[in-house]
Amino acid sequence: MNVVDRLIEYTIQKKNPTVVGLDPDLTKIPSCYLQKVHAHEDPRATAAEIITTFNRDIIDTVAPYVPAVKPQMAFYEMYGHYGVKAFEETVVYAKSKGLVVIEDAKRNDIGNTANAYACGHLGTVPLPNGSRAPSMDADFLTVTPYLGSESLTPFIQACKDHGKGIFILVKTSNSTSGEIQSAITAQGTTVTQSMAHYVADQEKSTRGTHGYSSVGAVVGATYPKEAEALRALMPRSYFLVPGYGAQGGGPQDVLPCFNPDGLGAIVNSSRGILYSHTTGAEREACPREIYLARVKAETQTMQQALYEALKTRYPDMLY
């Protein structure tokens, strides 16, 4: 099954086009998680154990309500191979709970290096005995496009060969994105528009049974007017929408990312679900059960707000 079809079916089942970002920050995680692990000789190993325990609790809490989670690789790689192992264990655990996993790693290069990234994160890797096996094995991967189309080809091929998906950076949510993405190309379009045309061109060869492509776009919630124009340029491409919650985006801001069927986008919240409801003082004394109840409440609040906004704008949507 095309991975975007699986994402869509989970979205319809749970009436929720949202994804919880797994950004484990030891300066924000409640202290109850920091105190109940074995202290390893290398403190990075201790950090990785905390991350794994924390992520499992978050996954258990949100899995009934969301179709996907999005671990941001930077929060894992900062702890070296210990952190990468925690990432791998998180991917396996999330999949065991029936969640789609979007790896936010923004990878790319050219030639053999791009192919190695595609094989390692989405496909299979060669082993000493001559066989091949999955490695990171994410369902989706975020990819940066700024080395040109040759750098994207291996990732698109991996999508076709292994039933995976990618989200190409088209319009990101950060305030300085326009410094590059609004620049005018030799063809008279902005970089963002040029990338949107490229993403749309991949649609027919990567379309699933629901009519959407597994080659999608990152389109930030903080630029709703541009999102509306990009939706028109990429009508059958799935959008990963960051910038909701802590970065200022709200339900009305993300509506232009969707189609009238209520599909076409998945909206991410990381800090808004994991951390924004707990003050520094509360983190020092917050019991695990109370913290996870707040995570659940924030997840449900986001789902309800987004669903109500979508249903009001698109009363005939599919869920």
Image (tube, grey):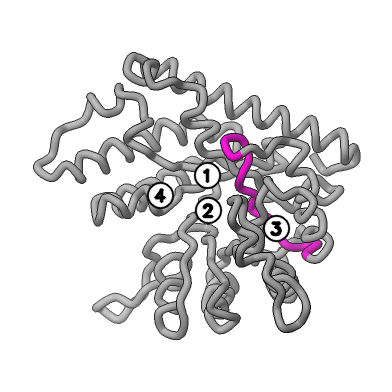
For marks 4 and 2 on the same chain, the one whose residue lies earlier in the sequence = 4
Q: Quadrant of residue 312?
A: top right
Q: Tell me which amino acid carries mark 4.
A: Val
Question: Are the residues at dot 2 and dot 1 in contact (C-beta closer than 8 Å)?
Answer: yes
Q: Which residue is mark 3?
A: 238
Q: What is the x, y in percent for residue 59?
A: 46, 36
For marks 1 and 4 on the same chain, the one whose residue lies earlier in the sequence = 1
Task: Say which quadrant the N terminus sits in.
Answer: bottom right
Q: Indicate yes or no whether the magenta region holds residue 51.
A: no
Q: Which residue is mark 1?
A: 69
Near-viewer residue (316 or 290): 290
Q: Tell me which amino acid carries mark 1.
A: Val
Q: Find the distance from the CA under tag 4 to the CA under tag 3.
A: 24 Å
Q: Find the distance from the CA under tag 1 to the CA under tag 4.
A: 12 Å
In this picture, which residue range is highlighted in magenta? 234-247
Question: Are the residues at dot 1 and dot 4 in contact (C-beta closer than 8 Å)?
Answer: no
Mark 2 crowd level (few <14, some 14–19, many ≥20, 10 Å Cα): many
Callout 4: SS: helix
Mark 3 crowd level (few <14, some 14–19, many ≥20, 10 Å Cα): many
Q: Which residue is mark 4?
A: 92
Whether residue 199 is visible to the viewer of this picture, yes or no, is no
For marks 2 and 3 on the same chain, the one whose residue lies earlier in the sequence = 2
